[in-house]
Image (cartoon, rainbow, N blue to C red):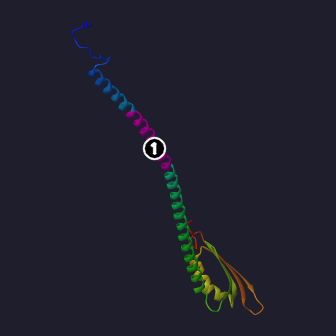
Amino acid sequence: MKFSYSKPFPKHILGPLAKVWIFYILLSVVIVWGLTRFLQKYIEITKNQTEISQVQGHIYSHENRRLEERIERTKQTLKSMRGKATYTVNVKDSIKGVLEMIPDSITIESITIDYSSLVLKGVVPSKEDFKNTIQQRLDSIFENSHVVFTPLNNGWYSFISTNSSVLPFIEKASN
């Protein structure tokens, strides 16, 4: 027996249009969730890379400071070496000048040169030889000159000439 005029057909809880809408809604939720996870991972990776870059930056800045300090020490060493080289040349020239002003008749036993003083010790045939040769030159170079003569048994004189000046006789090396 048949009570209905229409043919029976299966009824679904959701219609075809609702199924399409649910599919796209679920697809959207999955895509949004996937993008959120991707962005979270990307932010985490970027954060780690930033921290690594900051640490490397600190290392490089520290290394840069160390190199700048080494460069500055090297510059100071070079400046000191130049000063010492200049000082050596000045000492050489001063000694050469002192030796050139000593005549053959005078024997020098020792020469002591400081920045602003000169001490000569030696033997001279007479006081006048010393005064006429070396003492005149020393007076023109130094402000203060003092000579002590000691007679020797052979008639010659031993002398100690101490000369000093406010201005340096030898230019000091700048350190």
Residue 2: image location, x then y, percent:
25, 8
Q: Residue furthest right?
A: 153
Tell me if residue 55 comes above or below residue 85 in the rendering.
Answer: above
* Magenta segment boundaries in residue numbering: 34-57
Q: Residues within 10 Å of mark 1 (few under 14, many from 20)?
A: few
| Prevalent SS, magenta region | helix
Please name the residue shown 34% across and 29% down the image: 27
Q: Quadrant of the N terminus?
A: top left
Tell me if residue 159 comes above or below residue 15 in the rendering.
Answer: below
Q: Secondary structure at mark 1?
A: helix
Residue 26: image location, x then y, percent:
35, 27
Near-viewer residue (132 or 77): 77
Is residue 11 part of the magenta span, yes or no? no
Q: Residue furthest front?
A: 1
Residue 38 in the figure: left or right of residue 69:
left
Residue 159 in the figure: left or right of residue 143:
right
Near-viewer residue (55 or 81): 55
Residue 166: image location, x then y, percent:
59, 69
Please name the residue shown 43% across and 38% down the image: 43
Give the residue type at disc 1.
Answer: Thr
Which residue matches tag 1?
Answer: 50
Q: Residue furthest left?
A: 5
Is residue 55 part of the magenta span, yes or no? yes
Near-viewer residue (120 or 172): 172
Residue 163: image location, x then y, percent:
64, 76
